[in-house]
Image (cartoon, grey):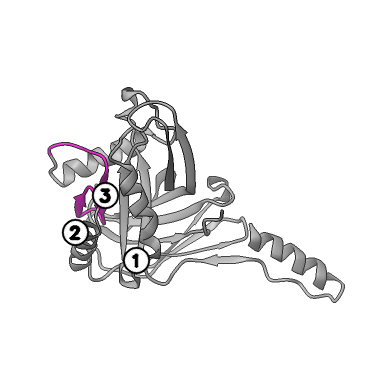
Amino acid sequence: MRCLSLSIALLAMTAAAGVVAAPCRAVSPAHTVALVELYTSQGCSSCPPADQWLSRLPAGQAQFRAVALALHIGYWDYIGWKDPFAARVMTDRQHAYARVLRQRYVYTPEMVVDGVTHEPGVTTASIDQMLATAQRQSPTRATPRLERVMDGPLTITLAPFKLEGSAPADITLVVYDRRHSTPVPRGENTGHTLDNFNVVRRIETVAKWDGSAASRTVAPHRFQPGQGIAVLVQHNDYGSMIGCNKLEPRITG
């Protein structure tokens, strides 16, 4: 990482003077507006446009600044191309949303925004509408503060927040790769090189939260250099999103 290289250089230059260089520290944004989960597959010919829209969301209008994640499912693998990023946990999460949102079936591409609304997510109008719907339903958010020094542990801090209902909320850790380009030799996308963004590689519930002030630490072995880290605070049993945030390195190249 550039930050690590810079810190090493500064340490070398200041050691002779007896000055200790400050460690490189990453802190999350003060506020994010919504969580956008794109359920996608490299075996689905309808998915590439939604994958491209997802890549534009984090850099969009300030009021629609979002945590944008791509979760690859595996139920289209039988068509002829096995998605290398698909995992059962992603497929199970999509099925859970289908149950909670009373969908008749799961589909790709599907964007789920804040756990409250869903659409294919292939037009600006539909995405803007989903984001606006999510903002209306969750005008007040509990945005977690994320902090990490160099390649050390992640610290998650939450201020007090009044939860709806009696069940504790889920604090979920998501680790993702910023970008992958994959040549696809078989299946519906034969002959295309697909660009996928914010590809989720790990998703797990790390704590329950009762709404009181809290701080949690996540060990550094869960992350690889250059990966993005998101923390989701969500009502129990795949309910609506209470808050979310990210530490996200820039895409290079």
Tell me the kind of residue under disc 3.
Answer: Met
Inspect this view and state whether residue 171 appears. Answer: no
The verdict on residue 202 being magenta is no
Quick one: label 2 or label 1, which is nearer the N terminus? 2
Pointer 2: residues within 10 angstroms few (<14), some, or many (20+)? Answer: few
Q: Which element is circle 3 on?
A: strand
Of marks 3 and 1, the one in the foreground: 3
Q: Which residue is mark 2?
A: 165
Foreground residue, 108 or 234? 108
**Residue 211 place in picture, x, y as percent:** 31, 64
- Disc 2, disc 1: CB below 8 Å? no
* Image-based side of 104 in relation to 115, left or right: left
Q: Give the main secondary structure, helix, strand or loop, of the magenta stretch.
A: loop
Q: Quadrant of residue 246?
A: bottom left
**Residue 228 place in picture, x, y as percent:** 49, 53
- The residue at the point 24 percent across, 53 percent down is 115
The verdict on residue 120 being magenta is yes
Tell me the kind of residue under disc 2.
Answer: Gly
Tell me the kind of residue under disc 1.
Answer: Ser
Q: Which residue is mark 3?
A: 111
* Image-based side of 249 in relation to 207, left or right: right
The stretch in magenta equals 104-122
Q: Which element is circle 2 on?
A: loop
Q: Which residue is mark 1?
A: 212
